[in-house]
Structure formats: C-alpha cells, structure tokens
Amino acid sequence: MSNAAIVGINWGDEGKGRMVDLLTGDYDVVVRYQGGGNAGHTVINDYGKFALHLLPSGIFRPGVMNILGNGVALDAENLWNEIETVRAKGVPLGPENLRVSERASLLLPWHRLLDGLEEARLKDKKYGSTKQGIAPFYGDKYQKKTVLAGELFYPEHLKSHLADLLEWKNLTLTRVYGAEPVTMDALLEWVADYGEKLKPFVCDTSAWLREASAAGKRILFEAQLGALRDLDFGIHPYTTSSNAIAAFAPVGSGLPGATLDEVIGVTKAYSTCVGEGPFVTEWFGPEAEALREEGGEYGAKTGRPRRVGPMDLVATRYGTRMQAATALALTKLDVLSYMQEIPVCVRYRVNGVETDEFPFPAALADAEPVYQTLPGWGCDVSAARKWEELPQAARDYVEFIERAVGCHIRYVSVGPERDSIIIR
Ligand code: GDP
C-alpha cells in the first residue's frame, strides 16, 4: 500500500491540478480533504481544459474513485456546475466514480452572502476573499452550526435543523449587516433542488475508505491552496479557513489512521499570490506585467490578475517544512525562458537584520528580499522530456532551488499538458 498527498508549498496555484492529473494513473482513489469552491485547479487533458474547484482531479481517469471528504466545504452549487461541465465534455461521472462524505457540511446560501457583506464592511482592510462563503462556513462549522450532507436523508430532522439555523443566521444578516433575511421558503427550495442532485453521491465514505485501504488500494490526497495559506501555519490572517497542509489529510478525508508514504509539494519556478497580505518578492510595473503575461497568471476562479515575483526561497523552504514534503514538483520552468537573468530571493532582511527563517506574520510586512541573480537559459524548454535535454543553466537553476530548500525536486514541469514533464 502506498498513499501520497499532493499539496501546495506557497500561496496556492502552484500547479497541483496538473500534478494530480499526471499521477492519478498510479492511484485507485483521489480524495479532497479541505477547502471548497474558492480555489481552482486547472487540468488540461484529452477531454479539454477544466477549472476544477471541488471535484477531485482523478475524475478523468477511468477506474479511479473520487471522494469529497468530511473536511471539505460542500458547496453544492459549485459542485453541481462542475459535474455538469465535466459530463458535457463526455467524462463518465456518477456514484461509481464520485462519492461525497455524509459528514461533509453543506455550504448554505447565507455563507456566500455573509462573505461578500463582511469583505464590503472591511473595505480597504479586506482579506481578499474569493467570496465563495468559505470563512463564514468554517466559522459556523466550528460553532457546530452547519448541516451535514447525510441529514438530507432525514427530511423532518433536516427541516427543523434548518429552521433553527435560519433564525440564528438572520439575526446576523439583518442586525449586523442590515441585509435582507433569507426566507424559509427560499432555503427549502434550494435544499430541494441541490439536495436531490447531491443525494445519490452521499454515503459513508469513511467506511468505504477504510475498506479500500485494508484491501491495499492506493490513495492520493489532493489539497487546495498552499502552506502559506494554511489556517494554522500560514500568513495569518491572510490564510484560508481550513488546513491546507498534508498532516490534515487523514482527518479531513475521513481516514484518521492513514499514513502518508509520500508528500509531494508543488511549487512554481517563481512566485505568485492571489489576494491580500504580505508578499515579499512582489514585482510591480513592467517587470510584473511581463512575468504575468508569460505565465498567464490570472486566477482560475476569479480571473483576477495574480501578484507575481521571483522565487522566494525563504517562504518555499518554510512551506516545504510545514508540508513535511518528501519530494517537490517544480512547475512552470518554461515560463522563465524569456529572462536573461533570473533573480531568486535567498534571504530576508527584517529591520536591517538578514535572516533565513520565515518571520512571524506580524513581522513579515517589514521583510525585504535579498536577491541572488542566476543566469537565464534563453531558449524554449517546453519540449524537454529528459533531464539531460534541459540547458545547463536551467538544470543549475533547479539544483540551486533544491539545495536551498533542502528537498529533492523529482518533477520538473515545462508545460501545462499532461506529458510536459521531466521525472528525475
Ligand atoms: P493549482 O490550483 O495548484 O492546481 O494551480 P492552477 O491550476 O490554478 O494554476 C496552474 C496554472 O499553470 C494552470 O493554468 C496550469 O495549466 C498551468 N501550468 C501548470 N504547470 C505548468 C507548466 O509547467 N508550464 C506552464 N506553462 N503552465 C503550467
């Protein structure tokens, strides 16, 4: 038996989707264990190009079971849209290859509403939410004020539970934010629609996983976002509201005893960040424009231009440690081909003192990057499929990162397509 997690090392958008799509061929089960409709994985394969937010990236592989675990924010609207989009492209999708944990909490219409209202209240102090309801959802989950997917099978119980929650939630909507209340009729209509759509997929996935694991099935745990956005270890408060680290995979998937034989950390050959918060190596102006254009750095969910800058080895080393990565995948090396020289941030200077350590969040705003410049390779590397086919300067760049971060870079991705990869 061999289990692995694929996780983000930085702010998210590292290319986890393409790595999961590549590696799912070696696994029997792919499980999403946290997050919801807020971040998107881009997958390009024979069926076309997809931005997946909730569906596990194993959905395209015949014979692979895909599971949304109890740790996921079960956004029925987004999930259903994805199911329909994927089916429309001819991908077989049903309860035989997608299952949803009965213990996953439903993201309800007021979560999205409250997310937008709170960001509007924060004005220029906003956290940069994607307004998919994630923070209000997880807040409610910790307060035990959510509905579990399995409650869809107990209609009378569900109705009275929803009525209690509605009464409580409308106090916040109307008295704190001065917004319109949600009506019970609208809520029941929503549940009747999306609940019925989801029901065929909902079951005890924990029991299913336990049996699959005992039978020696190989399980791949798929994370969203990255270590720097992890609720506990990320750049507080500019984190997401769930744990994006690999250590949470056994809990959020519903297989608490699972061991991770491998943790594959995905990091880009440069840095990008969506949303607010400190980003030490951020570029502005024409330099940023050029990198953003070359890398197509626009959010998969929101279309927002991503903040971009050089590789940040301090943050990447920290992310690698917090993920306890056993190997790294370096993506988008091809994007850097246009640069004559490539700066990488090797240390920070915080209030005049140089450091290798990733600072406490409150000190991060004072950190400045200390750069070392490496030679570029000045040619297209997207056709390379073997390590030796990369120019020397590109290999030097990869090895420099590997040494600085202290983790083997096993995969070097040189394009978005499934086979644009070098395995070392
Ligand atoms: P994720 O959330 O970590 O899955 O990342 P995204 O899918 O949002 O962002 C990664 C983007 O980079 C997607 O558009 C991918 O198709 C693309 N991509 C991934 N790997 C490579 C690569 O090696 N080269 C290039 N040019 N694009 C890549």
Image: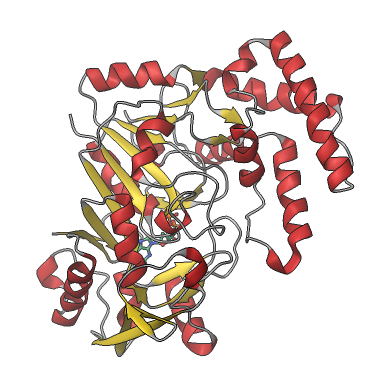
Q: Quadrant of the N terminus?
A: top left
Give the percent coordinates (x, y) of residue 307: 52, 72
- Say which quadrant the C terminus sits in: bottom left
Q: How many marks?
A: 0
- Above/below status of 350 relative to 186: below
12 and 337: which one is in front?
A: 12
| Ligand 1 lies in quarter | bottom left
Residue at the image position 73 percent from the left and 9 percent from the top: 156
Question: Can you see residue 397?
Answer: yes
The residue located at (27%, 78%) in the rendering is 380
Give the residue at x 83% y 27%: 167
Question: Residue 331 appears at what percent x and percent y?
Answer: 31, 64
| Chosen colour scheme | secondary structure
Q: Is residue 76 visible?
A: no
**188 relative to 354 in the view: left or right:** right
Q: Residue at x 37, y 18 (%)?
A: 208
Which residue is farthest left? 388
In the depicted structure, whether residue 322 falls above or below residue 32: below
In this view, the residue in front, 115 or 196, is: 115
**Residue 315 against residue 78 in the figure, above or below:** below
- Rendered image quadrant of residue 265: bottom left
Q: Quadrant of residue 105?
A: top right
Vertical arrangement, residue 294 with respect to residue 222, above or below: below
Q: Tell me where residue 55 appears, x and y as whole percent.
A: 48, 38
Q: Quadrant of residue 92?
A: top left
Residue nearer the viewer, 239 or 342: 239
Q: Position of residue 69 (x, y in %)?
A: 45, 30
